Amino acid sequence: MNSNEPTALDAQVDNLANQLAAVQPQLDDLAHARIGAALQEMVEAGPPSAVPMQSAPPAKRIYALAFALVAAAAVVALLVFGASEQTTTAPSLAVHDNAISPEPAPPKQVPHLEYQEQELADGTTLRIHDDAEVSVKSLPTGQRLHLAQGTIEVYGSHLERPITIVVNDVEVSFFDAVISASVTRKNLVITLSSGEFSIHRDRNTAPKLVSAPGETSIPIGDSSAKRTRARSKKGTKELPQEPPVTTAKTLYLEAEVLMTQGRSDEGVEKLRTLLSMFPQDHRVDDAQLDIARIAYRQNDFATSRTFLTPLAQRATKNALSQSAHYLLCRVEIQQKALGRDRCIKSFRATYPASHRDEELLRVQIEVAHKRGGCAAAESLLSEFSRLHATSANAGRLAPHLRRCSEPERP
Amino acid sequence: MTLALKKRPSYSDAEQVAQVLAGDTTAFTRIYTDHHPRVFALLTRILGPVPDRDDLLQESFLQLYHALPAFRGDSSLATFLYRIVSRIAVKAGKRKRREPLTFDSEILERCFGDNNAGKDAQDRQLLEQTFTLLLQIRVERRIAFVLNAVEGLSYQEVGRVLDIAPDAAKQRCLRARRDLKQLLEKRQSEYRAGDIQ
């Protein structure tokens, strides 16, 4: 047999490719809304800055160059500090992940200044002082700035994902703040100009929220002391612990941080605490919706329904009750429950101008078509044609249209 | 019965990018609306039905936005976007190599899109097996395979997306096929052995 002749295994590989081609995943509507909001905010912040890229060398060479620079910096750091982890020498910025541009510009020669400024992927401004040693890691859960020494200043405003400054075992996170962070031998000193931040030490300790402008000194662990070989035998002097003050706001913000970090279960725990401790707080509805959303994502539809039903049925209709009603319908759809049609009808009647109308009407058409064929779906299809003919979902109805357009066979 | 589906005004890639750079806030929304289903599908095909695909999708469009000034129009906007998505997928794929392979039945069901009504447990199981095989091969090869065999890109286009020569792209695609064939063969022999026992 000719070796180039397709074998049965080749056919199976082609079959795999065909199966993958049939994969047409649907983006979860909540994620769709979240991404849409994030992009909208980014776009409204102004157009991307036009950097001339015509002469930019190919990305391969750039990465090779960047890798060489980072490697050289790491070697220097090892020689100078005896550091065991990869760091960059001051003042420097190593972006480990998620370069912004697919064709990044070559690293510029930065003149010797007291500080240098960098704009991070989410638009945050990072000012690195001359004495700072910092590396930046961009993750889907947010930007992490590993500060080994010196001072940095960060200006973040209304961020979708948190900025986290990491110094040894201490993590300082914020979404909206102007802060300066300095590492001394024993402490991380955070100076807050505006906004608020939370301090995390380990997973077993509750995060502490700081919203008062001013200076906060946080004792740090031993690793920097080890590196400088100047560790005192007495160890670091702990500041007296302030008794944690639990408010609905702190609980909600802590839950938000935890959920952004992917620690949903811990976030839900905080939200449930909020519900039990502050049942009259105005954040209760948001907390219930958040719990329901997480439960929905975890396929815990019963819990989701429990929290959504009262929100959806409330007399005062607002964006929150609309979201709850919509999610309730999604729960019914996911469970293929008998109530899905009723839920969709009720949602569409209550919120006729909702942007979700199109999607729910499409589901309604599909359900009607499946149950009663073209005759049952006809009026709904006409309604879709009238209301949403130019929408993105219009194409998805094509199979139903084709079937309903064909003349009926005797 | 027929439906008259109205068409939106169509803009070329260069026009759309120019509109974004000129500060037209709706232009980028249009780009997102046009391209996100393909990007989401591509991420799913490369990485499997993992729950953080929406984060990666968002990251892709965030990076695209900031990279738009670098768009020269040498290739289509889709190719330009695929380059970004591929890089993000490579990093995510390498990170996920250390994570156990699990499939969420609900997410798997949503992989069939809206026409999942006719899909049953057997279809889902088949898709799960496909992903189980695919996710065992190296992510760089996997991307080349998906772009070529599933998305229908030529070796030259795959090379352009992955920033490698067409020959290297071809090599990656063929290696991916070889890896898949070996895995299929192994699975068949294990299956036969199980049958005999």
Image (spheres, coloured by chain):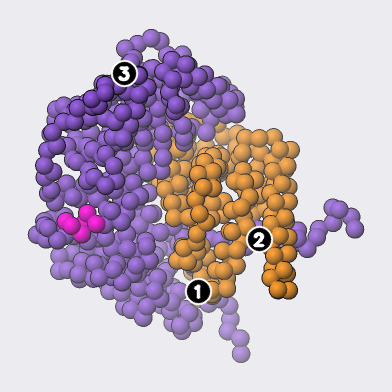
Q: Tag 2: residue type? A: Leu
Query: Looking at the figure, which quarter contains the C terminus of chain A?
Result: bottom right
Please state the horizontal and vertical placement of residue B119, each as a whole percent of the image. Answer: 54, 73
The magenta stretch spans residue A394: no
Residue at which label 3 appears: A230
User: Which residue: 35% across, 73% down?
Assistant: A332
Residues under labels 3 and 1: Cα distance? 67 Å
Q: Nearer the viewer, mark 2 or mark 3?
A: 3
Residue A155 seen in the current view: no
Residue farthest along the front direction in this orientation = A233
Q: Which residues are magenta?
A: A269-274
Chain for colour purple: A
**Rendering colour (chain B):** orange
Residues under labels 1 and 2: Cα distance? 21 Å
Q: Dot 3: within a 10 Å radius of its alpha carbon, few (fewer than 14), some, or many (20 or more) residues?
A: few
| SS for callout 2 | helix
Please state the horizontal and vertical placement of residue B63, each as a whole percent of the image. Answer: 45, 38
Q: Nearer the viewer, mark 3 or mark 1?
A: 3
Nearer-N-terminus badge (2/3): 2
Residue at which label 1 appears: B117
Depth check: A302 or A79 in front?
A79
Q: Dot 1: within a 10 Å radius of its alpha carbon, few (fewer than 14), some, or many (20 or more) residues?
A: few
Q: Write down the quadrant of residue B22 in the picture.
A: top left
